[in-house]
Amino acid sequence: MQKDLYMKNPNEKIVVQSDDLKYDGKNIIIPSYYAGVISDYLANVDTQAMNDADKHDFMAFSSFFEAILDYKNNK
């Protein structure tokens, strides 16, 4: 299944695409309507077993999506 996600022409700007999710070889492009779903998944992650560095990265990643949701809700 994953092989089907790769674009046929390597000269295209998008290398991998699945519906509205895109990867251009450098950036992952996620539509803003996914922010709530991702935030919900992140809220259910058990961080107790994470080491401090991973937990710090996870919290930064979670905060990013919280900021997106705050912006969307106050717009």
Image: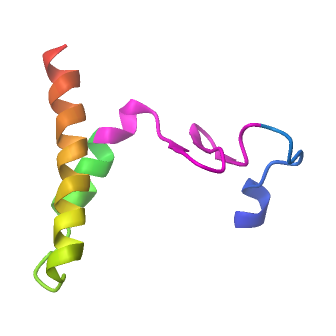
Q: Is residue 29 magenta?
A: yes
The residue lying at 64 percent from left, 47 percent from top is 18
Please state if 14 lies on the left or on the right of 54 as rendered.
Answer: right
Q: Is residue 41 above or below residue 65?
A: below
Residue located farthest toward the top when viewing the structure as drawn: 75
Query: Within the image, what quadrant is residue 49 found in?
Result: bottom left
Say which quadrant the C terminus sits in. Answer: top left
Residue 26 at x, y = what percent?
Answer: 59, 49
> Is residue 1 in view?
no
Q: How many marks?
A: 0
Q: Quadrant of residue 20?
A: top right
Residue span colored magenta: 13-35
Instruction: Estimate the x, y position of residue 12 in percent, counting from the top left.
Output: 81, 38
In the rendered image, the quadrant that contains the N terminus is bottom right
Query: Residue 56 lies in magenta, yes or no?
Result: no
From the viewer's perspective, is 15 left or right of 68? Answer: right
Return the x and y of residue 46 as percentages of the image width and height. 16, 75
Residue 55 shows up from this direction: yes
Asked which quadrant contains residue 73, the reply is: top left
The residue drawn where x is 10% and y is 81% is: 48
Instruction: Note whether 17 is above or below 32 in the view shown.
Output: below
In the picture, measured across the screen, residue 11 lies left or right of residue 25, that is right
**Left or right of 41: which side holds 23?**
right
Q: How is the image coloured?
A: rainbow
- Residue 74 picture location, percent across and down: 13, 17
x 37%, y 32%: residue:
33
Residue farthest left in this picture: 48
Q: Looking at the picture, does residue 65 appear above or below residue 50?
A: above
